[in-house]
Amino acid sequence: MQEKKTTREEYQKCVNAVVDYINLHLGEEIDLKSLAKISHFSPFYFHRIMRAFLGEPIGMFIVRTRTEAAARLLRYSDIPIADIAYRIGYSSSSSLSKIFKQFYGISPLEYRNNKNFVIMKPAIIRPDLELKSEIKNIPARNVIYIRLLGDYKLNDYGGTWCRLCQFVKEQNLPMGELSPLCIYHDDPKVTPVDKLRTDVCMVLPVTAVPKGDIGFKQLPAGRYAIFVYQGSYDNLQAVYDTIYGKYLPEMECTIRDEASAERYLNDPCTTAPEDLLTEIYIPIE
């Protein structure tokens, strides 16, 4: 049985266990599924929580940690560059050189020979966002939906919503809630862009018969941490970082292994970006 994580300290303890493991196994293949097991977070939320606490995706953290370890060995040891590459998990010095240049703009050999070159640590951004929040039990909901595949940022949400409205009229159904509800099933940091799944939903007061690519399902009742964010959709990643890294631990929440959702409270076509209101639903126990 998994131990519940109800405080920021307990979240941080789990994150620290992952970081310690990474530091001790830089020269080995580091499997992200194994890291999720070490953290005791569910695979779905592991990547979000790690990003929130580390300030960057876990994959980037691993690469950066390896590269910083290489920099220390280059500066403070005489170990051959090829051996350093192998020691931190790269198969060749050329692989290390490529990554090293991407991070620092200089090759490992140039860095070793230039004692005056200073490597600056990448900035870790901790967005200071004020969000309205509450914990609420949501009853079961009937929804019609269309599932979209592809980049979350490029989906045609407006056109899809219009199709749901047209379906309601054609089927002589009572109009549902006017605020679209989108369920995001995948984490874009770990799922290929072309396989990301989004359900664009309309909550209805009645059941409906699915037709074509318009489906019907009932969302089960459950407990949710609900956050209201005002601002541009472009900043939603920072909002999620704040929720997972600050709000949920402070609210002593344990996350359920279910997809999160967003409800859009005003029309982006007629609302200034800074005035957009997004309601974010995080399933909790």
Image: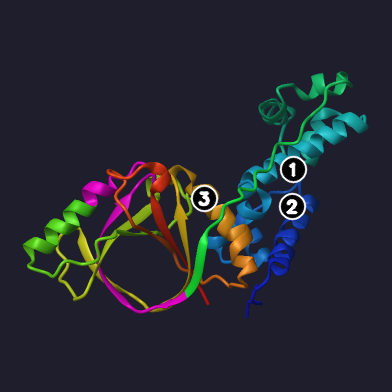
Whether the magenta-drawn stretch holds residue 156 is answered as yes
The residue at which mark 2 appears reads as 22
Badge 3 vs badge 2, beta-carbon distance below 8 Å? no
Work out whether mark 1 precedes mark 2 in sequence or the reverse, and give the earlier one: 2
Where does label 1 land, which residue?
Answer: 65
Say which of 204 and 33 sits in front: 204
Mark number, residue 1: none
- Which corner quadrant of the image does residue 16 belong to? bottom right
Task: Determine which residue is flagged by label 3.
Answer: 190
Q: Residue at x 75, y 36 (%)?
A: 121
- Which stretch appears magenta? 136-160
Determine the CA span between mark 3 and mark 2. 18 Å
Is residue 189 among the parts visible in the rendering? no
- The amino acid pointed to by label 1 is Thr
Q: How is the image coloured?
A: rainbow
Q: Position of residue 171 (x, y in %)?
A: 8, 66
Q: Residue at x 23, y 54 (%)?
A: 161
Observer able to see residue 53 = yes
Residue at (77, 31) in percent of width and height: 120
Element on which disc 3 rests:
loop
